[in-house]
Image (spheres, helix red, strand yellow):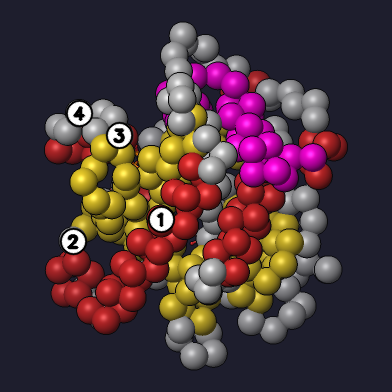
Amino acid sequence: MKKGKKLYEGKAKIIYASPEKNSVIQHFKDDATAYNNQKKATIEGKGILNNRISEHILSSLSEIGIKNHLIKRLNMREQLVEFLDIIPIEFVIRNIATGSLTKRVGIEEGTILDFPLIEYCLKDDKLGDPIISQEHILNFKWLKKIEIDLINEQCLRINDFLQGMFKGIGIKLVDFKVEFGKTKSDEKIILADEISPDTCRLWDSKTDKKLDKDRFRNDLGEIIEGYQEVARRLGILHEQSNIRPIKFSKPTAVKIKKNK
Ligand code: ADP
Ligand code: UDP
């Protein structure tokens, strides 16, 4: 499919116009950023893996009736997706306490939460994606109450499904972030963006070894190997034989701490 002009370039993906109505091409880059863009690197092969992993997850979610923007994967790095008006909120669902939650409320790392915790962050890099409450969302008319309820319900269904799917392949779904958007034609809210090791925390069930972007955030090394392990366990790595061998490009020559 012939790509149109670049509509937006983000930290990890590029959105291009597509020749098909109401759709855009989502291109997965190898770029990685953390700590509000302060840490940057190129991780060779990451975009290919995220494209494939996210396609697998979003297709599986479609099968259980969770509507989302994925139309089809086009090639190794690109997907055709429905063009949406993205809701400027990141929805974070947590099962185990780690990351910003532990720092913010002082809860011990690794605490298993009694029930999934949904948090809302304003999607605004300049402001550092601050955490916000439902009252902010309502007061500033980012969403109506009925829309928040619908998205919360979808987040919990996605969490339930993904927890089970990952459990089956020996992985704990610790937390993840999702985005939603409204369709151009009838303003229906559907799941957007990506679900991948860039946007989830995934720990090996037995060892708690991290298989996600925390390997980059925390200089744990073997970043791409973590992503490959997720793809391998999902049964989709065999289609990716041509992304190997993976070489780390310069900025990712990170210190390898002895860690999980
Ligand atoms: P960021 O914008 O945070 O740097 P990315 O590099 O992942 O993030 O860029 C992808 C951008 O595309 C995100 O801002 C995301 O909200 C947006 N996006 C994802 N899916 C769609 C879609 N279906 N329609 C329009 N925009 C989308
Ligand atoms: N997350 C994300 N994009 C963001 C912020 C968070 O995908 O801009 C994901 C992150 O990978 C993790 C979850 O959301 O799976 C919770 O992240 P947390 O707030 O703990 O992020 P931190 O501040 O530690 O990066």
Instruction: Give the residue pinned by disc 2.
Output: 133
Instruction: Give the residue pinned by disc 3.
Output: 98
- The residue carrying pointer 3 sits among few (fewer than 14), some (14 to 19) or many (20 or more) residues within 10 Å by Cα, namely some
Indicate left or right for 211 with 218 as reference. Answer: right
Highlighted range, magenta: 214-238
- Dot 1: element: helix
Instruction: Give the residue pinned by disc 1.
Output: 159
Task: Point out residue 197 in the picture as x, y percentages from the top left corner.
Answer: 53, 41
Sequence-wise, which precedes: disc 3 or disc 1?
3
Tell me the residue at 85%/37% (across/down).
242
- Dot 2: element: loop
Instruction: Give the residue pinned by disc 4.
Output: 108
- 232 or 5: nearer the eye? 232
Tell me the residue at 68%/24% (across/down).
249
- 216 or 42: nearer the eye? 216
The residues bearing labels 3 and 4 have C-alpha atoms spaced at a distance of 8 Å
Mark 3: amino acid? Thr
